[in-house]
Image (tube, rainbow, N blue to C red):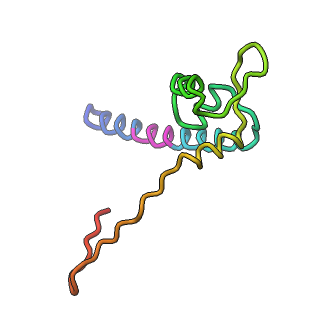
Amino acid sequence: MNEQQQTVTDAQWGERCSVKLDKLLSRVDQLIGMLFHLKGTFTVEDAALYLGITPSHLYKLVRKYDIPHSRPTNGRIFFNKEDLDKWIKSRMVFEPETIVQNEPGQQHECYY
């Protein structure tokens, strides 16, 4: 096999590995999401992952009493999943949809 053919083969191999890695990471995300539905109580690390924020940001929210939590023993912090879901919904901001009106006979442009 000459050098050019080897380069093409290496590039194709790298591309296939990248696609497989993306599929694997997507599946891991799905599995993590499924596990969150099974748990009722989260640790700081679990809650941060569930909320999509860093643990340090979550600690700041706890310190300010901005997020529902409990410290039943030894100062460890726990979060109830239902309380987190309510907290998320209470923080959601809905922006009114803007309607773009075209002049008669003018087509609307779409970019995909």
The percent coordinates of residue 34 (x first, y second) are 69, 44
Q: Residue placed at 69% from the left, 41% from the top?
A: 83
Going 44% across and 38% down the picture, which residue do you hit?
18
Q: Quadrant of residue 102?
A: bottom left
Residue 40 is situated, as x and y percent measured from the top left of the image, at 76, 38
What's the residue at 52%, 50% (across, down)? 92
Q: Measured from the top left, where is residue 60 in percent x and y? A: 53, 24
For this view, does 91 lie left or right of residue 36? left
Residue at the image point whose x is 72% and y is 27% from the top: 70
Please tell me whether residue 84 is drawn above or below residue 89 in the rendered image. above
In front: 73, or 26?
73
Instruction: In this rendered view, identify the residue nearer to me: 17 or 50.
Output: 50
Classify the position of the C terminus by image quarter. Answer: bottom left
Q: Which residues are magenta?
A: 15-22
As drawn, 5 above or below 45: below
- Quadrant of the rendering where the N terminus is positioned: top left
84 to the left or right of 26: right
